[in-house]
Amino acid sequence: MHKKNFFNKFKRDKEYQRYYKEASDLLDIALQISKTRKRKNITQVQLAKRAGMPQSQIARIESGNHNVTLGTLNRVTSALNLKLKVAA
């Protein structure tokens, strides 16, 4: 099977589509937090202190590779003076 055919098969797979959407959404959130933090000239250490969590947790959130609870997202967005909004 050629590589193109292999990936086309996955693109049609519902479980793959769900996983891809979740990963994409998580990365979008991570990038938004990182960009906002940098735009406000706040370090990860400063943000972590404001949010009441270790700097390593901010780094994990910004990496986009870890699931984050709504409670944690709310703490981070509040520390950035943002409002967390979930929309469909």
Image (cartoon, grey):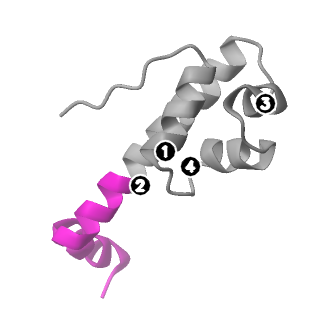
**Structural distance between the alpha carbons of marks 1 and 4:** 5 Å
Does the CB distance between marks 1 and 2 fall below 8 Å? yes
* Earlier sequence position, callout 2 versus callout 3: 2
Q: Which residue is mark 2?
A: 23
- Magenta stretch: residue 74 in it? no
Left or right relative to 13: residue 31? right
The residue sitting at 78% across, 30% down in the picture is 49
* Residues under numbered marks 2 and 3 in contact, where contact means CB atoms less than 8 Å apart: no
Give the magenta part as a residue range.
1-22
Q: Which type of secondary structure does the marked residue at label 3 adopt?
A: helix
Q: CA distance from mark 4 to mark 3?
A: 20 Å
Q: Which residue is mark 3?
A: 49
Q: Residue at the location (55% across, 22% down)? A: 78
Instruction: Please state if 75 lies on the left or on the right of 26 as rendered.
Output: right
Look at mark 1 in the image and give the residue it sits on: 27
Specify the farthest residue to the bottom. 1
| Label pair 1/4, CB-CB below 8 angstroms | yes
What is the three-letter code of the residue carrying label 3?
Lys
Choose mark 4 or mark 3, whichever is in front: 3
Give the class, few, some or many, for how many residues have Cα within 10 Å of label 1's Cα (few <14, many ≥20). Answer: some
Upstream in sequence: badge 4 or badge 3: 3
Mark 1 vs 3, N-terminal side: 1
The quadrant of the image that shows the C terminus is: top left
Q: CA distance from mark 1 to mark 2?
A: 6 Å
> Do the residues under discs 2 and 4 have CB atoms within 8 angstroms?
yes
Give x and y (percent) for residue 4.
31, 71
